[in-house]
Amino acid sequence: MSDPPRSEGPFAARDFAEAPFLVTWELTRACALHCRHCRAAAIPDRNPGELSTAEAHRLLEQFASLRPHPPFIVLTGGDATERPDLSSIIERSISLGLTTDVAPSVTPRLTEETIAAWSRQGVHTVSISLDGPTAETHDRFRGVPGTFAASVRAARAIVEHGLQLQVNTSICPETVGGLEAMANLVAEIGARRWEVFFVIGTGRARELAALSADETEAALTWLARHAPSAPYRLTTVAAPQYRRVREQLGPSRAPSGVPVIKEGRGFAFVDHMGNVAPNGYLPLAAGNVRSEPFSEIYRFSPLFRVLRDARRLRGRCGRCSYREVCGGSRARAYADTGDILAEDPACPFQPEMMET
Ligand code: SF4
């Protein structure tokens, strides 16, 4: 996560070594879709080993106990709506004072009634994936005809029911040509946030081509030029060098002192079995909430600790003056090289040597 999801206010006095800003929780890996870029390599049926309702409630209590700044929670999957107890999990989360978002898949389960119920319950944001600006581009990428129309319909319903809408877009060679048209569509449907994900080769996405470093740089430069005039907040995933690109474009586009949220540093991922990882795209479990408190795993596991120490980075990221505010995508470094501390191959920047 290279950029924060909300305003600067919530960052005041937060210590990302103590608690994450954001937790994405994969409630289930079940999903009726079969997207080609799926991180989770989702499966049709629920795994009997998923956290139970009681375990889910206990985990929420752990999140809420991370005072004074409990994390924001994103409930995702697979498809979160595959869990019949989703409503109870949302209700418990909100009753504990946790800001709660839902990231469902667009399937027949995502009805207007469901969206209206989430609005009544007090869900903060609902995110919808749109990877192309037309039915032709999106449906080809998703592999299911009609998904574009259903996604736009769901997005409009989210806005109409007073929920904040986030649009997620996966960028790879197949979709990058639609970036400008996507930006216009995101504005037209009234999204509050556009999250642009630079595809990493994990899960089923191993079969997809990724952008080259120069193509990634060009896309980030376009986004950085576009962001100041956009009617939504624009953030990137798996491209923390977006911050460097903005700084290099000049003060008017430089980030305003908001800390970077990334793997293990302000961000954590919990999978459907309770394994805690620094990121859903970095499938290394640092511990499991069935046997250890979440806070202990986040604060003290060697994996999370090393990811919070930019001095440990190697290659160009290790000698880069932007390593504290960027540090490269650890998930991509791991997917491409097997080394979580290697340089990010999607960044073409050639840093000078720096004092350590
Ligand atoms: S070399 Fe690494 S730390 Fe420097 S800007 Fe590129 S990705 Fe970020």
Image (cartoon, rainbow, N blue to C red):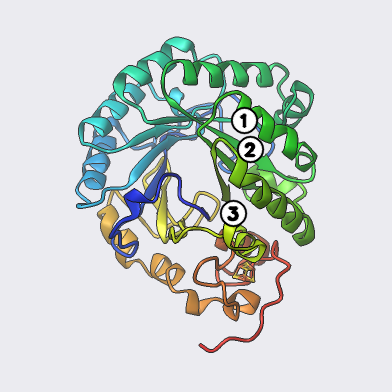
Q: Is 186 located above or below residue 343 in the figure?
A: above
Q: Residue furthest bottom?
A: 355
Q: Which mark is residue 186?
A: 1
Q: Is residue 236 left or right of residue 175?
A: left
**Residue 166: percent from left, percent from top:** 51, 33
Q: Which quadrant of the view contains residue 75? A: top left
Mark 3 lies on a secondary structure that is loop
Q: Residue furthest top?
A: 113
Mark 2 lies on a secondary structure that is strand
What is the crowding at mark 3: few (fewer than 14 residues within 10 Å), some, or many (at least 20)? many
Circles 2 and 1, Cβ within 8 Å, touching? The answer is yes
Seen at 24% across and 35% down, the residue is 57
**Residue 32: percent from left, percent from top:** 57, 23
Seen at 34% across and 61% down, the residue is 16
* Of 343 and 57, the residue lying toward us: 343
Q: Earlier in the sequence, mark 3 or mark 1?
A: 1
On the image, numbered disc 2 is attached to which residue?
A: 169
Seen at 61% across and 30% down, the residue is 187
Q: Amino acid at mark 2?
A: Thr
On the image, numbered disc 3 is attached to which residue?
A: 238
Q: Earlier in the sequence, mark 2 or mark 1?
A: 2
* Of 290 and 262, the residue lying toward us: 262
Mark 1 lies on a secondary structure that is helix
Q: How far apart are the alpha carbons under marks 3 and 1?
A: 20 Å
Q: Which quadrant of the view contains residue 93? A: top left
Q: Earlier in the sequence, mark 2 or mark 3?
A: 2
Does label 1 point to a residue whose CB lies under 8 Å from ligand 1? no
Q: Amino acid at mark 1?
A: Val
